[in-house]
Image (tube, rainbow, N blue to C red):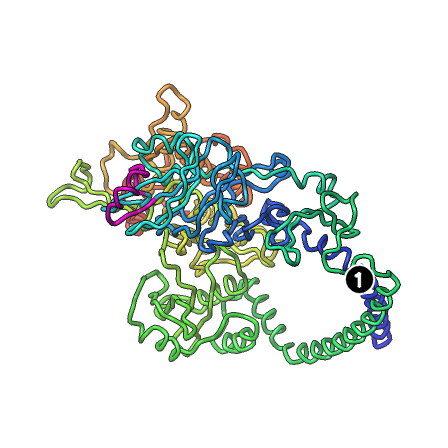
Amino acid sequence: MKIALRLILQLFFFSTLLRTIYSASTTNSTYYYNQCAPSTCGSSTMKFPFGEKPLCSSGYIRTTCENNSVYLIDEENTHIKYKLLQNLTNEVYTNRSIRLVDNSLFGCGTLPPFIGSPRQNSGYEAETRSLLGAFQYSSTYRIGTFFNCTREPDKDTLARMTRSPCLECGETSNLCYFYDYYIGEFYDGYVGNVDGCIPFRVAIPVNIAANLSVVRNLRRVLQEGFQVQWDEKCNSCMENDVGRCGYVNQEKKTSREEYCFCRDGVHKDNCNGNIIDLDGTAGKDILNKKKIGLIVGIGMTGAAFMFSCALYISYKRRQKKHSPFRSTYDQVLRRYLDGDNGTTPASIQTFLHNYSLERPTRFSYKQLKKYTNNFAQKIGQGGFGSVFKGQLPNGFTIAVKILDETTNQIETQFLNEVLTIGCIHHNHLVRLMGYCFDRSRIALIYEYLVNGSLDKYILQKRHMNKGQSKNTSTPQDVTEIMNLMWTQLLDIAIGTAKGLAYLHEECRNRILHCDIKPHNILLDDKFQPKVSDFGLAMLLNKENSYISVTHGTGTPGYAPPEMWYAKFGPVTDKSDVYSFGMVVLEMAGKRRNFEVDVSKTSEMYFPEWVFSHHVQNAYGDGGGSKWHECQGKEEEEIAMRLELVGLWCIQFEPSKRPSMRKVVDMLEGTMAVEIPSAPFDGNMSTYGYGSDVTIAPELDTLSSFKNAESNGSFAD
């Protein structure tokens, strides 16, 4: 062992020496070329003019990657962010054209003001030393400014403006105007700050700018984005992937100039021209470079060798110190995967002591009382306990779930959460910040998500007039629902599907959530979804495809048939797919799945009703029943996609349901979605659902389950 280690270290020493000498002799020639190497962001390839580093992006912009989407940030107005509406593919780079949109137009937040003044650019619209000035626009777009004013501007300014709809989502008492920089084909100058007004600069289609008075929803029109182009100046450089284009600020020059970065140095237009001396080193004697490289290389190699030895010694000490953690963790995890739920509080205490070395923070109950101001603000109540809002000393807002000690198998529920969500991190899974296991007081601490759970945005609440029968629907019914745009609903569905796909396919151990429903999908400040509540979650080894559960697990209305009846097969990851499908149908219909005690003349299972009244009729002469409220072709297409995906997910036979990875592809539009077969053939009572279960705007899931159970419809 010692001999092998010595040989490895010697090999490392000599390979590092050679590599350092080589790199030192070639750094000057390849520095810029290496800086602009392409990178990936989701399905996009980021390179000039969308490179991540300042050298490799177009003038006056900065490119970032967030949640697998590419964004452009204005260097002059850093609070303004543009989202690319297309993936950066070879076709986009070949056509030198892409569609983007101001990201602040999504949602209903305040639109950021624009700072700066434009200058005229012959042949194209007005531009600035900003993102909008880094690209070119065709004659189908105008660059102008919307002004949101609390009072009417002065007469001279007002004469140069057009009255327009406001960009707010709701009603407003403000006065809104649009200023077009051009009158016909002539540049009309620039209107800067206007007293009492907030400017918002946009690129808007010419036909829309000329007919603002008839536009119903201006914000939605602007969400379609605008097309920009860039010139072909760098084509000869990047042809056949020989060179990489970029910008450099040369000494004594204030403007940024384009150059071609090649393996042998920097050129002006392509890799065949003369090498340009940007840093004053070109043309120096190569031998001097190698001598310097040799000296630097030996010094760096010696330092690297000493550092490697220190790392090895530190690793061995840490391995010896933490070996109890690994053995304890693996032991508890192995027992858990083998179905041993006889874990004692003492063994959990030992496990958590070692587990905390690398996992979420362990808090005391006293700390939680302090962080929540003695549990002053209750924000939720679930089947496993109460949730309170709090704040850590660093200002981070948290949600503290105090598990109900009267709940059966509270230790098992606690371990479910800690062993699943505590071990993984994903953009669409709620983050477990820490936990408390203090005698009989057990708590879980999560990140706080300001927009709460999905159910309050998609589930209707109806208020009946006094004395009105529950089974009677009249025009006096008032529906209170917090509306989300169809694009937001689609994004929420995609994000949730990605989170579940990660649990099913990408974790070290496969994780089944077993309780997907709108209440367990939380929304952050940008309405991005995060799956939460892993109290019923199950861990599987990768080689296992199913688990055994106590039948009756899950929430009625969302749990699949196999969770209620053993004869329908084992519980697998397709069980989560079913529950997700129910949620998607609710998102598309914005209504609940069941209600008990309604008129027999209207009884029908909700997904069956979706299939028979909408999907089957959607391609007929009637054009479908359009039970959802859509405006325009795009919204209809989104609604239809959600419905079809939902119906595929709730197929009665698990083998017919798609995987969550395929669900993501269908929702994103990268996979065609065909019309599925009817999810449930025949009458629902054939499969054990009671005759009192029917479509309705509200759901009492517990009473629905009990009613069906009392009729013998849930018996194995």
Q: In this orientation, does residue 572 appear?
A: no
Give whichever of 344, 32 is nearer the camera: 32
Residue drawn at 11 percent across, 44 percent down? 467
In the depicted structure, whether residue 106 falls above or below residue 353: above
Q: Quadrant of the N terminus?
A: bottom right
Q: What percent of the width, then of the height, locates residue 288? A: 86, 65
In the depicted structure, whether residue 151 falls above or below residue 435: above
Q: Residue 634 lies in magenta, yes or no?
A: no
Give whichever of 709, 348 is nearer the camera: 348
Q: What percent of the width, then of the height, locates residue 204? A: 42, 37
Q: In the image, is 625 to the left or to the right of 425? A: left
Residue drawn at 51 percent across, 54 percent down? 75
Residue drawn at 84 percent across, 64 percent down? 289
Residue to which mark 1 is pinned: 23
- Quarter of the figure with residue 272: top right
Q: What percent of the width, then of the height, locates residue 609? A: 35, 33
Give whichever of 314, 84 is nearer the camera: 84
The local crowd at label 1, few if under 14, some if 14 to 19, many if 20 or more residues have their Cα within 10 Å, is some
For the image, the number of numbered tags is: 1
- Quarter of the figure with residue 311: bottom right
Q: In this orientation, does residue 150 appear?
A: yes
Q: What percent of the width, then of the height, locates residue 688? A: 38, 41
Kind of residue indicated by mark 1: Ser
Q: In the image, is 652 to the left or to the right of 451? A: right
Q: Residue 162 lies in magenta, yes or no?
A: yes
In the depicted structure, whether residue 302 falls above or below residue 102: below
Give whichever of 155, 89 is nearer the camera: 155
Outermost residue toward the right in this view: 287
Outermost residue toward the left in this view: 467
Find numbered disc 1 in the image and state the secondary structure of the residue it sits on.
helix
Range drawn in magenta: 147-166
